[in-house]
Image: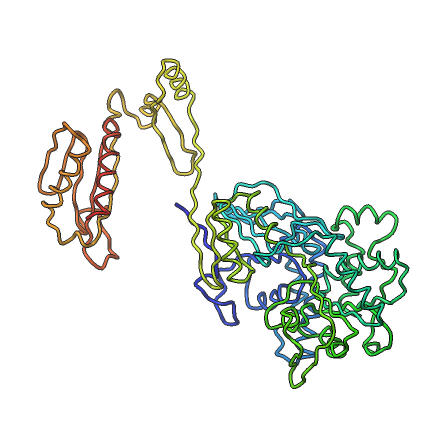
Amino acid sequence: MPHLRSGARGGKELRGGEDRRQTDHVRLWHAHGLLRPSCLPRFLSHLPLRHLLRCHHSLYPTKALAPLMLKDYHKIMVDRRGLEEQYTCDDILQCMNKVIPIDIKQTIQVDKDLQIRAYYAGHVIGAAMIYAQAGEETMVYTGDYNMTPDRHLGAAQIDRLQLDLLLTESTYATTIRDSKYSREREFLKAVHTCIAAGGKVLIPTFALGRAQELCILLDDYWERMNITVPIYFSAGLTLQANMYYKMLIGWTSQKIKESYTVRNPFDFKHVCPFERSMINAPGPCILFATPGMLGGGFSLEVFKQWAPSDKNLIALPGYCIAGTVGHKLMSGKSTRVDLDDTQIDVKCQIHQLAFSPHTDSKGIMDLVEFLSPKHVILVHGEKPKMASLKQRIESELGIPCQYPANHETALIPTKKDIKIIASKTFIKNCISEINGDKRIAEGILIMEKGQNAKFVSEEEFRETVGVEGNAVNTVTFTQCLSLPNNTVSIETKDMILALEKELKKSIKFRKFEVSEDCIKLESITIRICSNNISCNFGKDEDAEEMAMHLFCSWSIRDDEMARICLSVVKNMESTV
């Protein structure tokens, strides 16, 4: 039985100096946030990959946007924070030159053993789910995805596939969201109330995805309500990303594509660039600033200035990782935030929005039920919530599920389906026997290396092996079964007598021929042999102790009885 393995090979981290020679392919699912694409140049600078695949349905979105994210990460970590340079600008260029893009639903034969296909994942522009087939085993890795359409992207789409394994993200493993319209109403009400009172609204967000989604929402609302309060994009990465959105209309939602014939929806009428000198300018405004979660950068700089005023509002549009300022604010307990040697009094309003591009618990369950894989592995989530989702998947859908920790290897058993061809003569015999009210057809299964397995009639088998008449009965089948090491202390004669006793319980009215190391019944022979050179089947050069084996052989005419004997012997293995 083959197995699928999931997890870091050997439980090792991918650090400088580690041996990465066993890595053949790398796939970048999407390019928002900083950590995903920023790992790539560092990884490639220490790894001679045979292939690097751009496994996105959106060839141009991710390949176009990844360099922006890489350069921005480099600028933040090296120029602003003074940290060690992990990669250079030349590394970025070399990295992207190695990227081979693929299109949505395009099937790529990576090598003789591996085939992949990308499916639309929603989430952010260019995100993809990846279907992979390695030999007979199949799996889907979702990456980040969204099962609900929003204003600028559609919902995830995937074919109904026969899968051994589904690896799915579980960011919102226990969360079920309200309707999109009620969430949008709540957000617009909070923003309108703040600016009407003369306050400023800070929306910390990543440059890709939520910034464009909320700008479309606000731009439309401003137009309908005739509001003149300025909406700002922080200059830099967000503006560059938005420029690419204007060019990549073909990768957005159907509604955006249709409206593009009249006006580019990313040409916002009420949104303009923001400069640092405007942070303390008087009057209300709305500012989109990166990064999300208030983990640093310009959004955190603005937060320090605006948080002490009770007029202002911080609107957090999605998930915030533990340890970030955004996470502390979402907990509802922070009235003071410590930043380096500075304490920030938080008097502003905090509004948590459910605008995350990740699917919720219902979406995960819907996808698992739709694909109905044989096994599920949960990743990208919080351990207690993953445990709860695992229980739901197993109890409601009856599918085995696990959530291995980082660096833990998960072993997934799979069954291999074998294609068997039936010869015309065999089929003809089957039809004649069924017409004679005989429901079991007899034939012989031939399996040759490099060829499909084949059912043939006895006559065809004689021709194949070159025997005549009843000589087919001289063909011998063999099987060797290992016994536990503790049986070595048992005398061979005693083992034979115990085996004879068990066989007689299942096979009655038959005469057994018994010797000191062997039992015979018709053509069936069961012989006990120890770990020595006289028995090639029983030889085990790596065994630390002497091993004992049962060597079984039989002819085709006694095949049914031999199967009964083997079953008895296997049961003895577990009881000895």
* Image position of 506 with respect to 33: above or below: above
Residue at x 32%, y 23% (from the top left corner):
458
Looking at the rendering, which quadrant does residue 522 occupy? top left
Residue at x 49%, y 53% (from the top left corner):
390
Which residue is at the front of the view, 230 or 86? Answer: 230
Left or right of 21 in this view: 63:
right
Residue 303 image offset from top left, x and y in percent: 73, 75
Residue 482 image offset from top left, x and y in percent: 24, 48
* Image position of 111 with respect to 408: above or below: above
Residue 58 image offset from top left, x and y in percent: 69, 52
Residue at x 61%, y 51% (from the top left corner):
129
Q: Disc count in the image? A: 0
Which residue is at the front of the view, 216 or 528? Answer: 216
Left or right of 534 in this view: 364:
right
Q: Residue furthest bottom?
A: 341
Which residue is at the front of the view, 454 or 220? Answer: 220
Which residue is at the front of the view, 265 or 12? Answer: 265
Residue 228 image offset from top left, x and y in percent: 90, 65
User: What kind of colouring is applied to the model shown?
Assistant: rainbow
Q: Residue furthest top?
A: 436
- Whether residue 52 is visible: no
- Whether residue 255 is visible: yes
Quarter of the figure that contains the N terminus: top left
Left or right of 145 in this view: 282:
right
Left or right of 264 in this view: 402:
left
